Amino acid sequence: MGLDILFKIAGVGILISVIHTALKQAGKEDMAQLCTLAGFAIVLLWVVQLLGQLFTTVQGVFKLF
């Protein structure tokens, strides 16, 4: 699971950077920035979900709450 999510994040980063470069070369800087922001939001949601799982696991291990 840990290595899988790293490859997903790296894949999204590479894909977004290619799309950003293509849009910027086409003269659509605003769309390029919006695409980058959308990619960042997707990865941020993944990370927040993983942090939630981590906190749940820590609570289970230490029998908190």
Image (cartoon, rainbow, N blue to C red):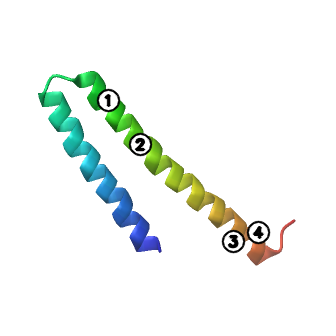
Q: Position of residue 53 (x, y in %)?
A: 64, 65
Is 1 placed above or below 37 here? below
N-term-proximal mark, 4 vs 2:
2
- What separation in Å lies between label 4 and label 2 (alpha carbons)? 28 Å
Q: Amino acid at mark 2?
A: Phe
| Mark 3 crowdedness (10 Å alpha carbons): few <14, some 14-19, many ≥20 | few
Q: Which residue is mark 3?
A: 57
Q: Is residue 45 left or right of residue 7?
A: right
Residue at the spot 71% in from the left edge and 66% down from the top edge: 56
Q: Position of residue 54 (x, y in %)?
A: 63, 66
Residue at the spot 34% in from the left edge and 37% down from the top edge: 36
Q: Amino acid at mark 4?
A: Gln
Labelled pair 4, 3 in contact (Cβ < 8 Å): yes
Q: Which residue is mark 4?
A: 59
Q: Is residue 30 left or right of residue 50?
A: left
N-term-proximal mark, 3 vs 2:
2
Labelled pair 2, 1 in contact (Cβ < 8 Å): no
